[in-house]
Amino acid sequence: MTLAIYPGSFDPITNGHLDVALRAARLFDRLILAVYSGVEKPNQLFPIAERIDLARGAIEASGDPVARRIEIETFSGLTVNYARAMGAQTIVRGLRAVSDFEYEFKYAHMNEHLAPEIEVVCLMTSSRLSFISSSFIREVAGLGGDVRGLVPTNVEVAIASRAGVLGIG
């Protein structure tokens, strides 16, 4: 049985993340969407428990039959150590644009150095979603912009419920 890890902060999970997760789940028997619970960032939108709930809700609401292969877990520390501990053979990464390539290239080679038995596979985000990032979503939402269609519906609702916190409205 093949197991892959798709790590990230997912703050918040976007339609781009969801696209990569569902496509990766078609390639592997199991996929763990691994939500990083390490150092809290100063511009963090959602605490770890809420990020997990939002990711789980987005995966379930996708309606895609392959979603049943996706598990949501948290981790901290090095991704390769988590992947080893879970028995994963692969780490999945998403590429939105050429600008992501240099970082992911270095990331893959460092992981190869640390854990040569674990492959890093990069999936290109669908072109219609390639401009979306969690940091853009946080910025746009924080300035009162409309993020509908860029994040799953449950994330839209969660962002709207934080309107006062974000300075919206």
Image: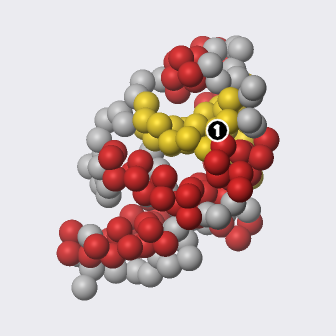
Image quadrant assignment for residue 70: top right
Q: Where is the N terminus found, in terms of image quarters? A: top right
> How far across and how far down the image is residue 4, in percent?
67, 32
Amino acid carrying label 1: it is Leu
Identity of the residue drawn at 64% across and 48% down: 68
25 w.r.t. 162: above or below: above
> What residue sits 43% from the left and 72% below the top?
156
Residue at the spot 38% in from the left edge and 73% down from the top edge: 157
Q: Position of residue 111 (x, y in %)?
A: 62, 22
Image position of 1 with respect to 150: above or below:
above
* Residue 101 visible somewhere in the drawing: no
Is residue 79 left or right of 159 when viewed as pictured? Answer: right
Residue furthest toward the bottom? 169
Rendered location of residue 165, percent (x, y):
21, 69
Q: Which residue is mark 1?
A: 31
Please name whichever residue, 74 or 97, is drawn nearer the observer in this view of the structure.
74
Residue 159: image quadrant is bottom left
Looking at the rendered image, the quarter that the C terminus falls into is: bottom left
Above or below, 132 relative to 87: below
- Name the spot of residue 75 as percent of width and height, x first: 43, 31
Q: Nearer the viewer, residue 113 or 93?
A: 93
Identified at 40% across, 80% down, the residue is 145
Residue 77 in which image quadrant: top left
